[in-house]
Image (cartoon, rainbow, N blue to C red):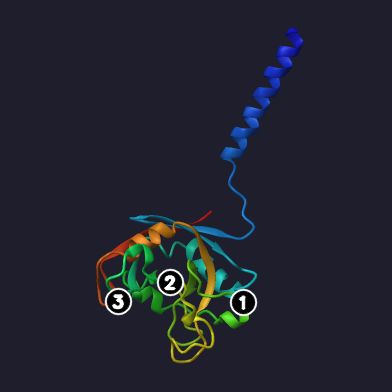
């Protein structure tokens, strides 16, 4: 009986150790994940390197090189007089309003249109901001509700090439909406929302 009790206790101890080990081990993801740390909370993104390899590689390099430390969300699109829980639009962030000189020196990323990738500007989609195709660098935006007007074939940027989706919010859309709800002047936030860093998980 003593031997049986000892084996039970030993098994329970082993199970506890395994559970603790699993809790301490870094979570494994099929696709790369990053977290945007903001003053209003964290936003977790899943990235799609198989579908948008160049966009993801560029974004991750900027993340790993610390480009997003002390940057901000500075631009917003939303409708007037709509509750923040249901207001469609985008929030845009990056270096533009904190270190535009550094951004200006960067080489543009080859444009990966939604026709190529099969991705779309659905709610939570993360996409590279640009002027002409191939000029995207550190600036990105997050979609709130369907924003398929930014997909290939639509004239949202004057060239029908659309923007390059490369990931999606998997946790923290409540933070995205909270940021979108902040006071604005035109398309700019009255007070920029600080990004302390973007970290790869």
Q: Residue furthest top?
A: 2
The image quadrant of residue 184 is bottom left
Number of numbered discs: 3
Q: How far apart are marks 1 and 2 (CA)?
A: 18 Å
Task: Tell which of 54 and 183 is nearer to you.
Answer: 183
Please determine whether, in this image, residue 192 is positioned above or below residue 136.
Answer: above
Measuring 39% from the left and 62% from the top, which residue is drawn there? Answer: 176
The image quadrant of residue 112 is bottom right
SS for dot 1:
loop
User: What x and y, as percent, mark residue 21?
Assistant: 61, 35
Which residue is denoted by mark 2 in the rendering?
A: 141
User: What x and y, as percent, mark residue 147?
Assistant: 46, 76
Q: Are marks 1 and 2 in contact (CB under 8 Å)?
A: no
Which residue is denoted by mark 1 in the rendering?
A: 118
Which comes sooner in the sequence, label 3 or label 1? 1
Which residue is denoted by mark 3 in the rendering?
A: 187
Q: Distance between the residues labelled 3 and 1?
A: 29 Å
């Amino acid at each position: 009986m003593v031997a049986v009790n000892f084996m039970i206790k030993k098994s329970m101890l082993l199970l506890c150790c395994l559970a603790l080990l699993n809790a301490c081990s870094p979570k494994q993801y099929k696709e790369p994940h990053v977290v945007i740390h903001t003053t209003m909370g964290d936003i977790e993104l899943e990235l799609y390197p198989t579908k948008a390899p160049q966009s993801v590689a560029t974004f991750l390099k900027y993340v790993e090189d610390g480009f997003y430390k002390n940057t901000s969300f500075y631009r917003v699109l939303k409708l007037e007089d709509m509750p923040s829980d249901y207001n469609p639009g985008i929030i845009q962030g990056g270096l533009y309003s904190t270190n535009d000189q550094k951004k200006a020196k960067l080489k543009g990323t080859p444009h990966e249109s939604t026709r190529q990738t099969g991705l779309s500007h659905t709610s939570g989609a993360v996409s590279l901001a640009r002027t002409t195709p191939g000029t995207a660098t550190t600036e990105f935006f997050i979609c709130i509700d369907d924003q398929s007007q930014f997909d290939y074939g639509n004239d949202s940027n004057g060239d029908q090439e659309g923007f390059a989706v490369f990931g999606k919010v998997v946790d923290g859309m409540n933070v995205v909406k909270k940021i979108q709800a902040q006071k604005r002047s035109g398309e700019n936030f009255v007070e920029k929302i600080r990004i302390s860093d973007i970290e790869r998980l």
